[in-house]
Image (spheres, rainbow, N blue to C red):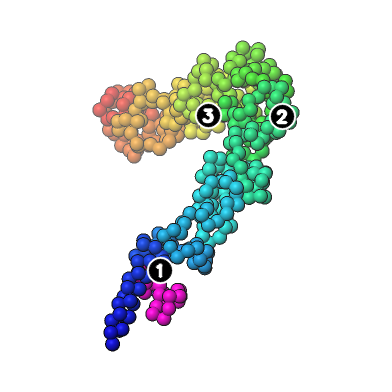
Amino acid sequence: MRKLPLIFGLLLLFGAGFYLQNPHGENLKFDCSACHTSEGWAFSASTAVFSHDSTSFILEGQHIYTNCRACHSNLIFSEAKSNCMDCHTDMHNNTVGLDCARCHSPKSWLVTNITEIHQLSRFPLLGAHNTADCIACHVSASNLEFQPLGVECVDCHRQDYMATTNPNHVQSGISTDCMDCHRIDAFEWTSKGFNHDFFPLTLGHDLTDCKSCHTAGLFEPVASECFSCHQQNFIASVNPPHQSLGFSTDCQNCHTTSPGWEPALIPNHQDFFVLNGAHARIAENCFLCHQGNYTQTPNTCYGCHSNEYNQTANPSHSAAQFPADCENCHSETAWKPSTFNHDAQFFPIYSGRHREEWNACADCHTTPANFQIFSCVDCHEHNRTEADKEHREVNGYAYNSISCFTCHPLGTAEDD
């Protein structure tokens, strides 16, 4: 009977020693029952209540199916490494750094967003670079090595620079900084991809053949003044003849870069003919007045508007033999309303009793061929009998319009 306390004491001592020699190390704070059962020490994921999510390294993607021993080579879990490079071989031979997560995810080693990743680098892929094959720049890409490359254009395109012939970059002394002339987002080396912002190639200057301006073959500086390139156009002009008329050689005074030199705008047109009112609205269409002839354009109203004069019907200017000095009755703003001062010179029809009592000139001027003839008696409601009776005691009275106007020059009953 005395042996039982001794055996029990030995078991307690053995248990205490085992606890002090925890095979998982002193830093493990989990309860044993989280991973083990009373049936044995063997770990079973199906029965264990332990979750790796409670640690600083969450199992995702392929890590979920990885054998625990692949990362935990011994039972001291705190010694397990969490960096990719601690478990995985660097297939890139240290050419892209040690942070695998920049390109890869736990799901797969395959990289599906290479372009997006490259945009975060010191050389974003723009233009033709975005469609280039990786191996065109990274010659060791087939070995999974991506050695750092220079980011200057000439680092990759020196052979293109040396092989140029139109123009010969080396002979012309053109800078090796390709971006001085070429756009990084272009798809070709031609003039369409040329950075010509110092002299915009727009509209009429949208040329594809550089030799059109750079005639010497070498891309020497070319004067930016219009006349330096367009002297022959100036001399050859005939309508109007620029040279004989002494036009300025500063082409941009009248022309823009629109093709065909049109439309031409003449800022000193006021020296020849002032463009006011309705004339100002046609300033951008010179043909309306010049009809293609800039040397014999009339500068009088009738010279341009004879058709309007001859076609008027109310009143008929030609039949009534109106003067051809249009400005006597009209303004440059519009033909209507006429500025003819009928009230002050002849008879008040825009004021007084006759205001708004007529619709057309022919209401009073009943003879279209002669506007010196007018009628008063055709408009008023009184008849001759009544008029004769009313004017019985008036000396020189006669029932006609001339007599009416003589006594009633203002169109009222009181004036005489």
Determine whether the residue tagged by mark 3 lies in a helix, strand or loop.
Answer: loop
Residue 14 image-quadrant placement: bottom left
Residue kind at label 2, given as amino acid type? Met
Distance Cα–Cα, label 3 vs label 2: 55 Å
The residue at the point 71 percent across, 33 percent down is 159
What's drawn in magenta, residue-wise? 30-48
Q: Earlier in the sequence, mark 3 or mark 2?
A: 2
Q: Earlier in the sequence, mark 3 or mark 1?
A: 1
Q: Give the prevailing secondary structure in the magenta stretch.
A: loop
Which residue, given by chain and number where applicable, does mark 3 sit on?
A: 282
Determine whether the residue tagged by mark 2 lies in a helix, strand or loop.
Answer: helix
Residue lying furthest front? 2
Which residue, given by chain and number where applicable, does mark 1 sit on?
A: 51
Please say if the residues under marks 3 and 2 sit with CB atoms less than 8 Å apart. no
The residue at the point 48 percent across, 33 percent down is 314
- Residue 416 position within the rendered picture, expressed as x and y whole percent measured from the top left: 28, 23
- Residue 106 position within the rendered picture, expressed as x and y whole percent measured from the top left: 51, 60
Q: Is residue 91 magenta?
A: no
Residue kind at label 3, given as amino acid type? Ile
